Image (tube, rainbow, N blue to C red):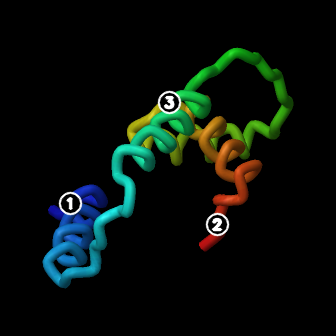
Amino acid sequence: MTTKQDREEKELLDSFERGEWRPVADAAAEKERYASYAKATFKKDKRVNIRISQKDLESIQKRAMEEGIPYQTLMGSVLHKYVSGRFQEK
């Protein structure tokens, strides 16, 4: 059985082997920039309480279980992607 991670890993490897990856001009600066993004993203200094339907909560919990992460983490990730303009519906 092929897992989602196995497929993604294969796609990455195939992409690399096709020569689709290019070096970054200033790798050290880029690494620093993305490290600061990650630090800011994972800093959780505010608590928010919301009311959602039981059905939506159960759907979120099911999706989080499929992803192997806590449902609060999934909710935070979705909100972060939305406010940063990176949320994409399929």
| Residue designated by label 1 | 6
Where the C terminus falls, by quadrant? bottom right
Residue type at numbered disc 1: Asp
Quarter of the figure with residue 17: bottom left
Q: Which disc, if any, is residue 70?
A: 3
Residue linked to disc 2: 88
Q: Nearer the viewer, residue 14 or 59?
A: 14
Regarding mark 1 in the picture, which secondary structure is present there? helix
In the image shown, does 34 or 45 lie closer to the viewer?
Answer: 34
Which quarter of the rendered picture does the N terminus lie within? bottom left
Q: Nearer the viewer, mark 2 or mark 3?
A: 2
Tell me if label 2 and label 3 are in contact, CB under 8 Å: no
**Circle 1 crowding by C-alpha within 10 Å: few under 14, some 14–19, many from 20:** few
- In front of the other: 34 or 3: 34
- Residue 78 rendering spot, x and y as whole percentages: 65, 47
The amino acid on which the numbered mark 3 sits, given as a three-letter code, is Pro
Q: Which mark is residue 32?
A: none
Q: What residue is rendered at 20% in x and 60% in y? A: 6
Q: Do labels 1 and 3 touch, CB within 8 Å?
A: no
Decide: is 10 above or below 32: below
* Circle 1/circle 2 CB separation < 8 Å: no
Q: Position of residue 82 (x, y in %)?
A: 72, 52
| 7 lies above or below 50 | below
> Which residue is outermost to the right?
51
Residue 43: x %, y % from top left: 60, 22
Residue in the picture at 71% in, 51% down? 84
Left or right side of 57 for 71: left
The residue at 46%/36% (across/down) is 35
Distance from label 1 to label 2 (Cα)? 22 Å
The first of marks 2 and 3 along the sequence is 3
